[in-house]
């Protein structure tokens, strides 16, 4: 009866990183006006909580939409480059883009989606929710 | 691939209210609202999760400037914080200050300030167990 029913699954990951909001071609005043304390010269950090939501049919043999060990290894492999790093300097993604919550979530969506599409058949990444603090998060999702 | 982006921030305020409808008899009010009909009111720590949808600005990487959002939301919340909603906020003088109506009020006031293009969703927690939502599309 529920053979083709699609189920979503969410797993939480954590990483800690520092970042700085600064636009090179803007004056110091303009940077401070727009980004406030996020402009501090040596960066500042957060413990990020990342919720990865997948959607897909339940595998008839395993009862799962994805093997969580596989999901963990895909995501943790990607997060290795973010965890305990200064995002502006230690990753290639934020040379031209400011590492805002929105942009980090967008980068992570594309990285995870790229790995998943090649590895997991019918299961799709449907949403990324990235908490920068308990009262602040960004979502990226597919239609 | 069509991707959507949203940004959410949670704000808190504390207020008193009494659920009481002048359209109902006193007995009916007690029956409908139970302990929330308590004569002299009661209060909650409310938390409002405001979600803004749009493309991150290519220059700033943000969907909305956080200062702009904070200013808009704080201006609205200031009118409710540490107030008795029914007695001190005129919008509630002819409406029951239920969670549903508070979330409607927040939507209406924020829409004026942020615009209906960007304002996407509001979730109001009244207690750990009660929440009310409104928006252009509920989060799945």
Image: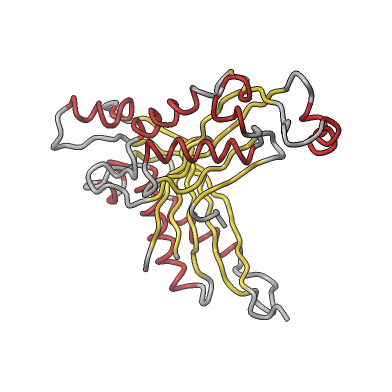
**Nearest to the observer: residue B30 or residue A91:** B30
Q: Residue at x 29, y 51 (%)?
A: A93
User: Relative to residue A126, is residue A89 depicted above or below?
Assistant: above
Taking the image as shown, residue A119 lies to the left or right of residue A36, namely right
Q: Residue at x 69, y 34 (%)?
A: B127
Q: Position of residue A117 (x, y in %)?
A: 44, 71
Specify the quadrant that holds the N terminus of chain A.
bottom right
Question: What is the count of numbered marks?
Answer: 0
User: Relative to residue B66, is residue A128 depicted above or below?
Assistant: below
User: Relative to residue A65, is residue B118 depicted above or below?
Assistant: above
**Nearest to the observer: residue A112 or residue B132:** B132
Classify residue A115 by image quadrant: bottom left
Name the colour scheme: secondary structure
Q: Residue at x 44, y 46 (%)?
A: A138
**Nearest to the observer: residue B81 or residue A51:** B81
Q: Residue at x 63, y 41 (%)?
A: B100
Q: Position of residue A79 (x, y in %)?
A: 44, 51
User: Relative to residue A105, is residue B26 depicted above or below?
Assistant: above
Q: Position of residue B66 (x, y in %)?
A: 36, 34
Q: Position of residue A77 (x, y in %)?
A: 46, 56
Specify the quadrant that holds the C terminus of chain A.
bottom left
């Amino acid at each position: 009866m529920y053979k083709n029913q699609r189920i979503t699954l969410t797993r939480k990951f954590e990483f800690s990183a520092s970042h700085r909001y600064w636009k090179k071609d803007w004056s110091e005043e303009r940077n401070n006006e727009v980004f406030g304390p996020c402009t501090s010269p040596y960066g500042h950090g957060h413990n990020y909580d990342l919720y990865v939501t997948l959607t897909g049919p339940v595998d008839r043999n395993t009862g799962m939409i994805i093997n969580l060990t596989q999901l963990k290894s895909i995501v943790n492999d990607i997060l290795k480059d973010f965890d305990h790093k200064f995002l502006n300097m230690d990753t290639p993604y934020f040379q031209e883009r400011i590492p805002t919550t929105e942009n980090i979530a967008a980068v992570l969506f594309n990285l995870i989606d790229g790995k998943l599409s090649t590895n997991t058949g019918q299961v799709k990444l449907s949403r990324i929710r990235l908490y920068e603090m308990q009262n602040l998060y960004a979502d990226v999702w597919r239609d | 691939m069509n991707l959507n982006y949203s940004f959410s921030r949670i704000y808190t305020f504390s207020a008193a209210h009494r659920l009481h409808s002048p359209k109902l008899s006193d007995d009916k009010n007690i029956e409908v609202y139970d302990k929330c009909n308590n004569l002299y009111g009661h209060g909650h720590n409310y938390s409002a999760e405001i979600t803004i949808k749009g493309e991150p600005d290519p220059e700033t990487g943000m969907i909305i400037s956080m200062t702009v959002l904070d200013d808009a939301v704080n201006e609205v919340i200031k009118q409710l914080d540490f107030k008795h909603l029914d007695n001190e906020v005129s919008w509630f003088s002819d409406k029951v200050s239920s969670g549903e109506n508070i979330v409607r009020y927040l939507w209406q006031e924020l829409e004026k300030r942020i615009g209906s293009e960007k304002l996407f969703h509001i979730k109001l927690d009244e207690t750990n167990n009660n929440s009310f939502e409104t928006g252009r599309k509920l989060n799945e």
